[in-house]
Image (cartoon, grey):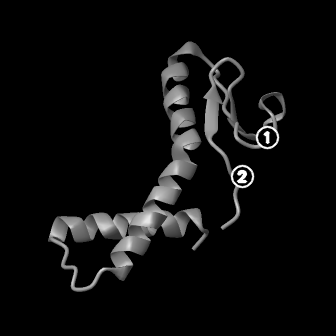
């Protein structure tokens, strides 16, 4: 899957989410922009922006976990772990448009 590589970071002042390891610091590609319409929404907007900026790290970690567990032999998940695994699989499918 292709997406903007690099560490994504949230600039609370501008509301922009940038990939800071791509290009130069001043010329980092903007990945997303979040907007606040009033002060009450500021906390929720900040949380949403942090989730968005963490998504490449979470995606790569989940993909790695799925690859490692798929190569393991005779792995038996508890019901709770099986549900968590299905949730991770669904998250990857959603991210990859399936």
Placement of the N terminus among the 4 image quadrants: bottom right
Q: How many numbered marks appear? A: 2
- Left or right of 18 in this view: 83: left
- Left or right of 76 in this view: 16: right
Provide residue 82's location: percent of width, then percent of height: 24, 71
- Left or right of 94 in this view: 76: left
Residue 20, quarter of the rendered image: top right
**Dot 2: element:** loop
Q: Residues within 10 Å of mark 1 (few under 14, many from 20)?
A: many
Residue furthest out toward the bottom:
74
Q: Answer above or below: position of 81 versus 58.
A: below
Whether pointer 2 and pointer 1 mark residues with C-beta atoms closer than 8 Å, the reply is yes
- Left or right of 27 in this view: 80: left
Q: Residues within 10 Å of mark 2 (few under 14, many from 20)?
A: some
Q: Answer above or below: position of 36 versus 98.
A: above
**Dot 1: element:** loop
Q: Answer above or below: position of 63 versus 75.
A: above
Provide residue 4's location: percent of width, then percent of height: 71, 52
Residue name at image x 63 percent, y 23 percent: 36
Residue name at image x 79 percent, y 40 percent: 29
Instruction: Check disc 2 and report the residue beneath it.
Output: 4
Q: Answer above or below: position of 72 versus 58.
A: below
Placement of the C terminus among the 4 image quadrants: bottom right
Numbered mark located on residue 29 in the image: 1
Residue 13, quarter of the rendered image: top right
Provide residue 66's location: percent of width, then percent of height: 41, 70
Q: Nearer the viewer, residue 70 or 50?
A: 70
Residue name at image x 51 percent, y 40 percent: 51
Numbered mark located on residue 80 in the image: none
Residue name at image x 16 percent, y 71 percent: 79
Q: How far apart are the alpha carbons under marks 2 and 1?
A: 8 Å
Which numbered disc flags the more N-terminal residue, 2 or 1? 2
């Amino acid at each position: 899957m292709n997406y903007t590589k690099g560490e994504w970071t949230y600039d609370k002042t501008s509301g922009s989410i940038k990939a800071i390891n791509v290009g130069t610091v001043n010329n980092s590609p903007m990945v997303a922009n979040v907007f606040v319409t009033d002060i009450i929404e500021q906390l929720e907007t900040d949380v949403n922006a942090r989730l968005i900026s963490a998504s490449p790290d979470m995606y790569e970690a989940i993909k790695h976990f799925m690859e490692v567990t798929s190569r393991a032999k005779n792995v038996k998940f508890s019901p709770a772990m099986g549900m968590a695994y299905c949730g991770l699989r669904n998250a990857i499918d959603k991210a990859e448009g399936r």
